[in-house]
Image: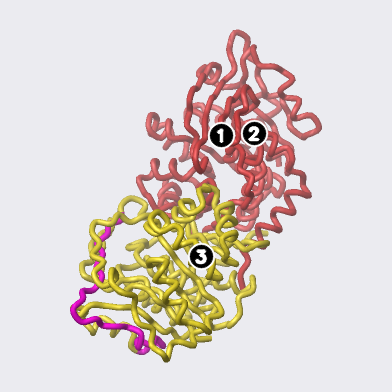
Chain colours: A red, B yellow
Amino acid sequence: MSLLVTGSIGIDTVETPHGKAADVLGGSAIYFSLSASLFAPVRLVGVVGADFPADRLDIFKGRPVDLAGVERRAGSKTFRWHGRYVGDMNAAQTLRTDLNVLGEAGPQIPPSFADSQVVFLANTHPALQREALARLKKAKLVVADTMNLWIETTREELLTTLGLVHGVVLNDGEARLLTGRTHLIDAGRRILALGPKFVVIKKGEHGAVLTTADDSCVLPAFPTTSVIDPTGAGDSFAGGMLGYLASTGSWGMADLRAAMARGTVMASFTIEGFSYTGLVKATRAAVDERLAALRRIMHFG
Amino acid sequence: MSLLVTGSIGIDTVETPHGKAADVLGGSAIYFSLSASLFAPVRLVGVVGADFPADRLDIFKGRPVDLAGVERRAGSKTFRWHGRYVGDMNAAQTLRTDLNVLGEAGPQIPPSFADSQVVFLANTHPALQREALARLKKAKLVVADTMNLWIETTREELLTTLGLVHGVVLNDGEARLLTGRTHLIDAGRRILALGPKFVVIKKGEHGAVLTTADDSCVLPAFPTTSVIDPTGAGDSFAGGMLGYLASTGSWGMADLRAAMARGTVMASFTIEGFSYTGLVKATRAAVDERLAALRRIMHFG
């Protein structure tokens, strides 16, 4: 099934205990697309400024990622983020954000993308998420991410958006902030009551929990010991999940479980290098190897 | 195989967002023994004061727990702890500790217990742990717990003890404090370098990680939504693990994995009620049901 992502494309500067990467390619749509494209073709929708070095997108060469939805906006500047991870690196400190073009109108969705069936609305203003969704009338599976900023400042808008999507992928802090519940399964159930059929709560190094009305799936993070830069792990997780679901074309509980595992593995590659350098090492064979390892470490008699 | 635990017996007062339980039975040896006795007979070693109401131990009636090692010391007072859990209840705030008899000499180990083969040294001063161990010359599997206090104040003593045991069970904060490593698999490997053959790092609501020289096992916590009082979860986990290992009489990787799962399930019962009220609901059938559920929630195709 056709898979579309709308999200950010940015230039990041990231500091972790392992070093610093300055002016590297980042953004949710980038990580999502690199990850998902291992499983299914991806249509990428995002907007950059006139300052964006076009060759940065060369990373997609040889991958089934359609860049027709990357809008280069004259007179605008590309989104920039500068963050730092310390200690256990479970949360980033934002040192500086220049929204730039992300503070303007949302990206155009090319007519050729209008028939997309699986859609990931990466984190952005919930009204922009709905705006994109309104143009995707063939969408059969819509999954959204969000963040603390929207939960705190545009709660009603966000609740409206959540009423329109099939799935939500968000992190533990966001789920707690959104629901006021500390217990994550409890929080997940509260989010289901807002409309979605499934909720995935990401817990960083502790893995992720999928909750549906009558079932759940809990997976630990893949235990890599080489954690260099967590940036993009969540979007890589979502990319692995939705890329897999687009490839199967169905999303029953067994599909969702398998998709969770692919997301888990893809996130593990991302955190092993700055920017996308870890993620691009994920081949199908390497992913299968980690899926087998993930099964093995959780197995008990 | 014969299983012995030496640990605390106390009177706890616990406050959680769900209420307060005053002057209830607690202590590591209590939780461990109740949990382990579902799998194997237990020899309990601990010391209480003259003030200890003897009928508190009636909870062990009908269970294969040998109380010959419970020493009632004249002129001494029973250990008391008053703690509070807030928010996500992952860590207790200690409001008051009266060490009382626990600040005196360690408990006597009855001669009839001297041939114990599987031994759990619950959290106490590492010199007392060694003292107990010195009297258990037939011990084949020795597992120790510890806490921040000993890591910070008696580090050298603790390192000596860790050099004598086969396994360590401790929580994530303790593992980080002991090793100075934030990444838990990394921390686990550092602990292996101190002597033990295996390390279990407990992560509260996020489950537990077992690390050996060449393998690992990662299990999520059993997803109960009824978290009433986390007190004793860690000792119930250790009880489930060692009770299972004592029942099989072997501790290869497959045994350790199976034991981790039993520990995980036993901890989930404990947190569902104040003091031991949740734990005592764990029947063999209920445990088997949760083991099956745990397999199911982690399964992916």
Give how far across and how far down residue A83 sits, in percent: 52, 28
CA distance separating discs 1 and 3: 32 Å
Q: What element carries label 3?
A: helix
Q: What residue sits right under mark 1 in the picture?
A: A16
Chain ID for label 2?
A: A
Q: Residue at x 59, y 71 (%)?
A: B256
Q: Relative to residue A195, is residue A134 depicted above or below?
A: above
What's under tag 1, amino acid-wise? Answer: Thr
Q: Quadrant of residue A159?
A: top left
Q: Residue furthest top?
A: A75
Count of marks overlaid on the render: 3
Q: Quadrant of residue A273?
A: top right
Looking at the rendering, the stretch of residues picked out in magenta corresponds to B62-85
Q: Alpha-carbon neighbours of circle 3 within 10 Å: few (<14), some, or many (≥20)?
A: many
Q: In this view, does A222 lie to the left or right of B5?
A: right
Residues tagged 1 and 2 counted as in contact (Cβ below 8 A): yes
Q: In this view, does A90 lie to the left or right of A60?
A: left
Seen from the viewer's position, the closer of residues B29 and A106 is: B29
Q: Of label 1 and label 2, which has the lower sequence position? A: 1
A31 in the magenta segment: no
